[in-house]
Image: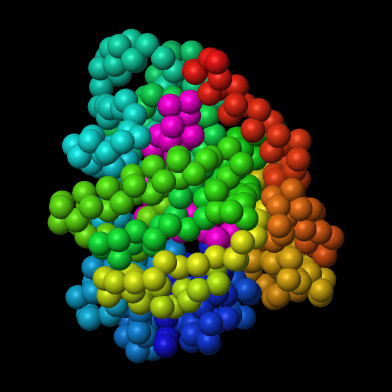
Amino acid sequence: MKILVVGGGGREHAVCRKLHEEGTRVISFMKNQNPGIIRDSDKYFTGDELDHGEIIKVAKGENVDLVFVGPDPVLETPLVDNLLREGIRVASPNRNAARIETSKSFMRDLLSFYGIGGDVSFKAFTDTNEMRSWISDLGREFVVKPVGLTGGKGVKVMGDHFSTVEEGIREAEKILKRDGTVLLEEKLVGEEFSLQCFCDGNNVYPMPLAQDYKRALEGDKGPNTGGMGSITDSDGLLPFVDRSSYEISISTVKRVSDAMKKEGNEYHGIMYAQFMETAEGPKIVEINARFADPEGINVLSVMDSSLTETFLGIADGHVGNQPTFISKATVLKYIVPVGYGSDPRPGPLKIKKGVENSSRRLYYAAVSGTLWNVNMTTSRSLAAVGISDSIIEASVESDLVTEYIDGNFYIRRDIGTAPYMNSKLRRMRELKEAKHPG
């Protein structure tokens, strides 16, 4: 079996590593020379990941059995559609299906039209006066979003990024001037969580729940980033998300998949839904068309069934058996350049041998170099993953990875720690008690 993986980040390294460990021949195509991906590939190519014509040449020239696309901007190109026209199997959604991520207004309209639970009040605008009227009618805090892809960095939340209605309108007008359209949504309060599912066009197969931490600094302060780290728990849930909310979330993703099929956009690939666990239950924040980064790395680190067979099932329309995961918690903390999120100052990192064991893994992200000496870019560099029986223990294991890294870098140490997790549990309990006293 020969699979072409497109993308050069930490998420794609996790995919390549899992496939390689299964004995699958990995061909990779990426814009950087990621040393982890190079190690786990039989052959690699570098180039523009948005050059779909060049990627198709590689797929045909290497006679691959299947292609998997990692980064979201690539899904916005005609790559998948053209691969399918060439008779090459793909375990990622085509361009129309990927609109569930690439167009936030398409996603919200779909949820609204099919009455899919967990939706929120929203509207896309091209006019400032209409925005003012809608905000007045909403009567509560709101969120400002670009309609298209943002890399997790373009969303502005009232109370976090701006304080008043006028400040929010100014943020919206910046996007309006740039893009011609802006999306406003009601602000949700609670704990976010991610549900990633394998989708074969007919069924959805859930992975363990995860939570991502986008704010750059400890205590959830500082600017939004692509994600500073993430957690999963040993039971597949999260301490602040119960079984009922988990089942509701799976049902919601299944209804989205069914709606896409009715719309003529049968969905084959990874569907990643981000929810907010609120006092009223889970609400949809956004839906994405690929593995989350970093949450995808967490789940792939503990997947013990075949990713190769799952990808084939996705492409062929029948995954069959539910993919399985070992009963371990994971904590991922991204090693990033100092100043990441505002004024990143990249430099070299040296990695000592012995960094990995059964409880620790290291994945390479936006770096180039060798396995032991890498050069950071302005983005996330290395993913330090701890694996243990509890989130708190896995957090300790993740920190131990950094003892093998020499250089000037930043990492959020608070992710998965006991004080931080307890504060989340307390906050969720207070929200529900305030909504349902007694």
Q: Is residue 22 left or right of residue 338?
A: left
Seen at 69% across and 38% down, the residue is: 421
Above or below 215: residue 251: below
Left or right of 297: which side holds 141?
A: left
The residue nearer to you, when weighing 148 against 397, is 397
Toward the viewer: 342 or 329?
A: 329
Q: Is residue 215 above or below residue 122?
A: below
The residue at the point 44 percent across, 78 percent down is 308
Q: How is the image coloured?
A: rainbow
Q: Is residue 136 magenta?
A: no
Which residue range is magenta in the image?
A: 274-299
Residue 121 visible:
yes
Q: How many marks?
A: 0
Residue at 34% across / 71% down in the picture? 319
Rendering quarter of residue 299? bottom right
The stretch drawn in magenta includes residue 287: yes
| Of residues 376 and 270, the one drawn nearer to the viewer in this rendering | 270
* Residue 338 is at least partly visible in this image: no
Residue 171 lies, in percent from the top left, at 43, 25
Image position, residue 334 (x, y; %): 67, 53
Q: At x 27% / y 30%, what residue is drawn?
A: 124
Residue 314: x and y in percent read 33, 70
Query: In the picture provided, is 375 more to the left or to the right than 227?
Result: right
Up the image or down, 291 lies above or below 312; here it is above
Quadrant where the C terminus sits is: top right
Quadrant placement of the N terminus: bottom left
